[in-house]
Image: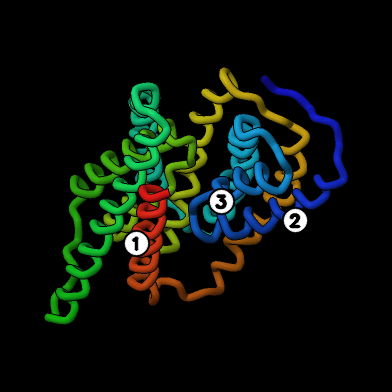
Amino acid sequence: MIFHSSFEFAYLWLPFIGFAVGFLGSLTGGGGGFIFIPLLTILFKVPPQIAIASSLAATLPICLAGAYGHYRKKNLDFRIGLIFAAAGILGALAGAQIANMMTGKQLKISFGIYSIIIAISMYLGQRKDKKAIANGEEPKILSNTGKYSRSTLYGFLSGIITATFGTSGSAPILAGLMSIRMPLKLVLGTSLLIVFVNTCSALGAHILVGKIDLTIVYFLASGSIVGALLGPRFLANIRVDKAEGQVRLWYALGMVVFGILMIVL
């Protein structure tokens, strides 16, 4: 159900929150929508069902504006992005069935284990590349078949995560794009395109069963669009490619911590 709630003065903070999330989301390639949910539920006392659906709707402008900004900076690989997105749609269908078969506790533990497995895979890949460089060898370049098969696998996983846990599925997307050794700036731009498609799919399901507060969406989007457009411009002035290995390792470490928290809490 789509509705407009009454205006509250506290909502005047939402554009600033949207700007920060949009800016960071376009920099990290994750869309940043996962930040909206705890903020809306804890600070603004929005019911979780409404917060989830409204967050997905507010995330769409971030992904769209961010992807467009990265496209203008040539930080977007359409072919790989579309393979991920197509596989993600199929994964979302499977994820919806999985979610109906599991309890909330089982979902949390499963997501934690999954995060740790993805992080270990990223770490081992980075370690292998580092060892090859130390031995004077070039990291193995994947064939097109290898790239497309990995893109399909990780895209399918991202769709499952999106439908099962109600998130954008950015973790497997970023891990998958990094695993095919795509340059970091291309990873960030392409990820936003994939997250956009995943979010559209998830939002379609929530429109049928959830509630979307357009008043909250308007206030968040008014700031998030501006932030998402500025993110790629800021990124263009940073030499991130030299720090790509460190970025992958820190991202893997963050996923391990997040996974452990999901299991024990």
Q: At numbered mark 2, what does the secondary structure look like: helix, strand or loop?
A: helix
Residue 257 seen anywhere in this rendered image of the structure: yes
First-in-chain label (3 vs 2) = 2
Q: Label 1: state its secondary structure.
A: helix
Nearer the N terminus, badge 3 or badge 1?
A: 3
The residue sitting at 80% across, 45% down in the picture is 11
Q: How far is the residue under mark 3 from the one under mark 2?
A: 14 Å
- Give the residue type at disc 3: Gly
Q: Position of residue 216 (x, y in %)?
A: 74, 38
Q: Is residue 198 left or right of residue 248?
A: right
Q: If you read the primary sequence from the N terminus, does the residue marked by circle 1 or circle 2 appear first?
A: 2
Residue type at numbered disc 2: Phe
Element at badge 3?
loop
Quickly name the residue at label 1. Answer: 252
Residue in the foreground of this view, choosing between 81 and 24: 24
* x and y, in percent, of residue 171 in the image: 40, 50
Q: Amino acid at mark 1?
A: Ala
Residue drawn 34% across and 58% down?
A: 256
Q: Which residue is mark 3?
A: 32
Where's the N terminus, which quadrant? top right
Please say if the residues under marks 1 and 2 sit with CB atoms less than 8 Å apart.
Answer: no
Dividing the picture into quadrants, the one containing residue 140 is bottom left
Q: Nearer the viewer, residue 111 or 76?
A: 111
Q: What residue is pinned by disc 2?
A: 16
Residue 57: tell me if it is visible: no
Is residue 194 toward the left or the right of residue 51 in the image?
A: left
